Structures are given as C-alpha cells and as structure tokens.
Image (tube, rainbow, N blue to C red):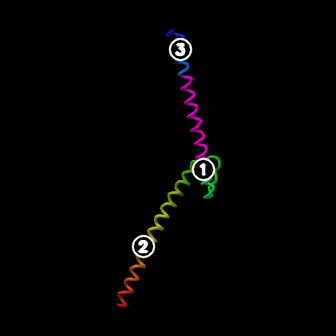
C-alpha cells in the first residue's frame, strides 16, 4: 500500500468507528429520555415536582420514599402473618377451653 492508500484506509476506519459511536450515543440518549420521562411520571404520581436547583434532592427523596414504601409493605406482610398466628392461637385456646 502507498502512504496515501494507508491513510485513506485509516480515515475510512475512523469514520466508520465514529458512525458506530454516534449511533450508540443516540441510542443511549433515547434511553435516557425514556428513563427521565418515567422518573418524572413517578415523581408526579407521588406529588414531587421538579423545581430549579433541587432535582438531585428530589430524586434522592423519591428513592428514599420508594424504599420506605417497600419497607412499609414488608411490615404490613409481617403484621398480617402475626395476626394470622394470633387468630390460630386464639382458636386453639378456645378449643382447649371448650374440651
């Protein structure tokens, strides 16, 4: 290959690489847009609004709220299980008293 041909091949390779990177970047940008819209929708659902300068705090607050909701649900499940056990204990106790 001549120097000019080698340079042309290298340039073509770089152009192809740049096209691929651009396509990946555009795809990532589209995914980020979808994630942002989803996050904003969820924030709106729980009554949190974006305001200038505090997006990070609101996102952290939303994430904390989601963790608390999950913990709350777990505690509700535990309370329900304990109530079931208590009910069974009371029934067994009543049967024992009746016998």
Q: Using the image, determine if residue 60 lies above or below residue 29.
A: below
Residue furthest out toward the top: 2
Secondary structure that dominates the magenta span: helix
Does 58 sit left or right of 95 as displayed?
right
| Residue shown at the point (52%, 55%) measured from the top left | 64
Q: Nearer the viewer, residue 83 or 66?
A: 83
Which is in the foreground here, disc 2 or disc 3? 3
Q: Which residue is mark 1?
A: 38
| Residue shown at the point (53%, 12%) measured from the top left | 5
Residue 68 in the magenta stretch? The answer is no
Q: Which residue is mark 2?
A: 82
How far apart are labels 1 and 2 at the CA level? Answer: 36 Å
Instruction: Compare marks 3 and 1 and give the one earlier in the sequence.
Output: 3
Q: Which residue is mark 3?
A: 7
How far apart are labels 2 and 3 at the CA level? Answer: 76 Å
Element marked by disc 3: helix
The region drawn magenta spans: 14-36
Element marked by disc 2: helix
Q: Quadrant of residue 83?
A: bottom left
Q: Position of residue 35 (x, y in %)?
A: 58, 46
Q: Position of residue 24 (x, y in %)?
A: 55, 34
Instruction: Compare marks 2 and 3 and give the one earlier in the sequence.
Output: 3
How far apart are labels 3 and 1 at the CA level? Answer: 46 Å
Q: Quadrant of residue 90?
A: bottom left
Q: Are marks 2 and 3 in contact (CB under 8 Å)?
A: no
Q: Quadrant of the C terminus?
A: bottom left
Q: Quadrant of residue 17?
A: top right
Q: Nearer the viewer, residue 72 or 24?
A: 24
């Amino acid at each position: 290959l001549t120097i000019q041909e080698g340079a042309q091949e290298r340039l073509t390779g770089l152009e192809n690489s740049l096209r691929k990177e651009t396509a990946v970047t555009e795809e990532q940008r589209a995914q980020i847009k979808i994630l942002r819209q989803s996050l904003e929708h969820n924030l709106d659902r729980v009554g949190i609004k974006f305001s200038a300068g505090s997006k990070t705090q609101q996102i952290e607050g939303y994430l904390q709220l989601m963790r608390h909701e999950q913990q709350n649900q777990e505690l509700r499940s535990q309370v329900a299980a304990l109530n079931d056990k208590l009910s069974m204990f009371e029934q067994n106790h009543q049967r024992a008293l009746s016998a």
